[in-house]
Amino acid sequence: LYVDYKIEVTDILTNYTSIDEIHSYSIDESFLDITESLNFFYPEIKNRYEQMNRIALDLQREIRDKLGLYVTVGMGDNPLLAKLAMDNYAKHNDNMRALIRYEDVPNKLWT
């Protein structure tokens, strides 16, 4: 059952980036590089972090609507910051999303 969900979630993720840009971290975690697809989804939004947040919201909704699963999303300027955002912030936020940018590191990680 768990593997079936992993396959279905990965299939949904391919709606947001190519399969080559999806990196499985574990059975229930993946990193997505959406750099190339940001402007494809929301060209009217000029701030890349707002674009990332909108894509994350869409992804959460699609997974919830199709599979009944609630997912947390960590976003960052690199995979490490995205993982730290998820573990330290997204899991504790009501919207289950969080972002750590390079400029956030001193305040969010060093304190």
Image: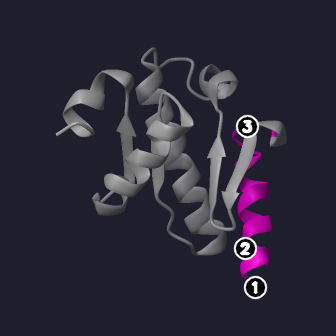
Tell me where residue 76 appears, x and y as whole percent: 46, 34
Helix, strand, or loop for circle 2?
A: helix
The answer to whether residue 31 is left or right of residue 12 is left
Residue identifier under label 3: 17
Q: Nearer the viewer, residue 85 or 7?
A: 85
Residue identifier under label 1: 1
| Chain part drawn in magenta | 1-18
Amino acid type at image mark 3:
Thr
**How far is the residue under mark 2 from the one under mark 3?**
19 Å
Amino acid type at image mark 1:
Leu
Q: Residues within 10 Å of mark 3 (few under 14, many from 20)?
A: some
Taking the magenta stretch, the answer to whether it contains residue 75 is no
Tell me where residue 67 appears, x and y as whole percent: 65, 72
Tell me where residue 70 appears, x and y as whole percent: 50, 68
Residue identifier under label 2: 5
Identify which residue is drawn at 53% across, 58% down. Answer: 61
Which residue sits furthest left?
Answer: 111
Mark 1 and 3 residues: CB-CB less than 8 Å, in contact?
A: no
Identify which residue is drawn at 16% across, 40% down. Answer: 111
Q: Quadrant of residue 50?
A: top left
Identify which residue is drawn at 44% across, 37% down. Answer: 81
Mark 1 and 2 residues: CB-CB less than 8 Å, in contact?
A: yes
**How far is the residue under mark 1 from the one under mark 3?**
25 Å
Amino acid type at image mark 2:
Tyr
